[in-house]
Image (spheres, rainbow, N blue to C red):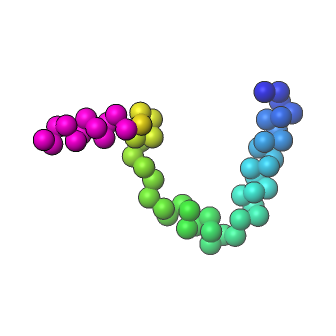
Amino acid sequence: MSFQEYLKYLTKRLVEYLDTPAAERKRRKEEPREAWSTRWFGAIPMSIRLLRRK
């Protein structure tokens, strides 16, 4: 990816962010996020936790 493409990408993301109403941004921020272990490793940590409980 060239610098120009990256700059276009960043500009696009910034414009999308600024076009989004403040209430919508706040609502998105308050939504619960998935756990970091699930985010990084998928369903493996969840399956291990389920196996431990049994």
Rendered residue at 76%/64% (across/down): 19
Of 44 and 18, which appears nearest the observer?
44
Locate residue 18, reporting x and y percent.
75, 61
Q: Residue furthest right?
A: 4
Name the image quarter holding the C terminus.
top left
Task: Classify 16 as above or below 39.
Answer: below
Horizontal side, residue 30 vs residue 36: left or right: right
Place of residue 50 in the rendered image (x, y in percent of width and height, measured from the top left): 22, 41
Residue 51, magenta (yes or no): yes
Q: Which quadrant, please, contains the N terminus?
A: top right
* Residue 51 position (above or below residue 18): above
Location of residue 36 by image quarter: top left
Residue reaching furthest to the bottom:
23
Q: Residue at x 48, y 62 (%)?
A: 31
Tell me if 50 is positioned left or right of 27 in this view: left
Percent x, y of residue 10: 77, 43
Name the residue located 69 percent from the left edge and 70 percent from the top edge: 21
Does residue 52 appear left or right of residue 8 in this picture? left
Nearest to the observer: residue 6 or residue 49: 49
Q: Where does the image place residue 17, in percent across and percent down from the top left?
A: 72, 58
Give the extent of the magenta segment: 43-54
Q: Main secondary structure of the magenta part?
A: helix
